[in-house]
């Protein structure tokens, strides 16, 4: 009886392990993001990967560069895994009619965070 309890417990514990994103896939996508957006103050390419099933990857996040999204999707397509795309290109033209601002000074600081110390 004790053998069956141990066997069933070990099967339940081993079956509940979450699926992990392959390290090579994560590194490849990170290298694309760093190449296209080397400085976070100048562009956005923020994403995360999640394994939905054994061969399905969910890509979610946001970027302001359509070419970054195309490069990430192309890399995922070449990996051989199925993928679900939830990567948003911002600003969304359906929500924001005038996505640009006008700077009226000669020199403007570009800061990483909205604070005086950054």
Image (cartoon, rainbow, N blue to C red):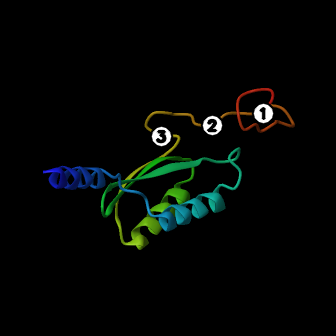
Report whether 115 appears left or right of 22.
right
Of badges 2 and 1, nearer the viewer stands 1
Packing grade of label 3 (10 A; few <14, some 14-19, many >=20) is: few
- Kindly check if marks 1 and 3 are in contact, taking CB atoms under 8 A apart as contact: no
Marking on residue 118: 1
Report whether 3 appears left or right of 92.
left
What residue is shown at x 43% (from left), y 59% (from top)? 21
The first of marks 2 and 1 along the sequence is 2
| Numbered disc 3: secondary structure | loop
Q: Residue furthest right?
A: 106
Q: Position of residue 16 (x, y in %)?
A: 29, 50
Gap between marks 2 and 3 measured at Cα: 12 Å
What residue is shown at x 60% (from left), y 47% (from top)? 44
Q: Quadrant of residue 74?
A: bottom left
What residue is shown at x 37% (from left), y 72% (from top)? 80
Report whether 56 appears left or right of 106.
left
Residue topped by disc 3: 92
Rendered view: 100 above or below 62: above
The first of marks 1 and 3 along the sequence is 3
Q: Position of residue 90 (x, y in %)?
A: 52, 43
Q: Quadrant of residue 20?
A: bottom left
Q: Residue furthest top?
A: 116
| Numbered disc 2: secondary structure | loop
Instruction: Name the foreground residue: 49 vs 98.
Output: 49
| Numbered disc 1: secondary structure | loop
What residue is shown at x 72% (from left), y 38% (from top)? 112
Marking on residue 100: 2
The first of marks 2 and 3 along the sequence is 3
- Kindly check if marks 2 and 3 are in contact, taking CB atoms under 8 A apart as contact: no
- Kindly check if marks 2 and 1 are in contact, taking CB atoms under 8 A apart as contact: no
Gap between marks 1 and 3 measured at Cα: 27 Å
């Amino acid at each position: 009886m004790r053998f069956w309890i141990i066997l069933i417990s070990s099967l339940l514990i081993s079956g509940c392990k979450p699926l992990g994103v392959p390290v090579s896939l994560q590194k490849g996508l990170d290298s694309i993001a760093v190449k296209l957006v080397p400085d976070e103050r100048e562009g956005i390419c923020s994403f995360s990967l999640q394994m939905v099933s054994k061969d399905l990857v969910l890509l979610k996040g946001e970027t302001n560069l359509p070419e970054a999204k195309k490069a990430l999707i192309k890399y995922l397509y070449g990996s051989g895994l199925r993928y679900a795309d939830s990567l948003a290109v911002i600003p969304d033209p359906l929500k924001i009619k005038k996505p640009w601002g006008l700077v009226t000074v000669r020199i403007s600081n570009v800061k990483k965070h909205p604070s005086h110390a950054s």
